């Protein structure tokens, strides 16, 4: 009997928005992603943050930029995210 391979439908890739905290590495940026969650007992909103390493192939980001990154296959030990778009640059925000 021959077995037919059935591929699973492509799921959505997770994407998040954050600010570039470090762009010192070659083709890698560190992005700080902040989120707010409600405390289960006190019902107050708490700010939580996560640092993610993302692949920046063209080294176009600088510290302070707001970017959108999406999840991808592991590129290295720490990098599993890829830069999608630079939403705003730090120097553009300072001018206006």
Image (cartoon, helix red, strand yellow):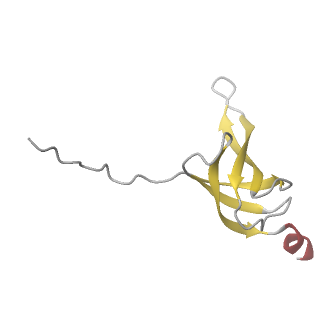
Considering depth in this image, is 82 or 77 the residue closer to the camera? 77
Residue at position x 80%, y 55% in the image? 20
Q: How many marks?
A: 0
For this orientation, the residue located farthest to the left is 1
Considering depth in this image, is 79 or 95 the residue closer to the camera? 79
Is residue 89 shown above or below 5? below
Considering depth in this image, is 43 or 8 the residue closer to the camera? 8
The C terminus is located in which quarter? bottom right
For this orientation, the residue located farthest to the bottom is 96
Judge left or right: residue 11 versus residue 78: left
For this orientation, the residue located farthest to the top is 41
Which of the 4 quarters of the picture holds residue 66?
bottom right
Judge left or right: residue 21 versus residue 27: right
Spot occupied by residue 78 in the image (x, y as percentages of width and height): 68, 41
Which of the 4 quarters of the picture holds residue 68?
bottom right
For this orientation, the residue located farthest to the front is 1
Is residue 50 shown above or below 94? above
Judge left or right: residue 42 versus residue 15: right
The N terminus is located in which quarter? top left
Which of the 4 quarters of the picture holds residue 91?
bottom right
Residue at position x 91%, y 76% in the image? 95
Residue at position x 62%, y 49% in the image? 75
Spot occupied by residue 48 in the image (x, y as percentages of width and height): 73, 37
Residue at position x 65%, y 44% in the image? 76
Spot occupied by residue 13 in the image (x, y as percentages of width and height): 50, 53
Spot occupied by residue 29 in the image (x, y as percentages of width and height): 77, 54
């Amino acid at each position: 009997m021959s077995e037919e391979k059935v591929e699973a439908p492509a799921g959505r890739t997770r994407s998040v928005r954050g600010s570039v905290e470090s762009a010192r590495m070659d083709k890698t940026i560190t992005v700080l992603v902040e989120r707010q969650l409600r405390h289960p007992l006190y019902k107050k909103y708490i700010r939580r943050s996560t640092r993610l390493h993302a692949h920046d192939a063209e080294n176009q980001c600088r510290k302070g930029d707001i970017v959108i990154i999406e999840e991808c296959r592991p590129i290295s030990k720490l990098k599993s995210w890829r830069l999608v778009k630079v939403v705003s640059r730090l120097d553009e925000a300072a001018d206006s």
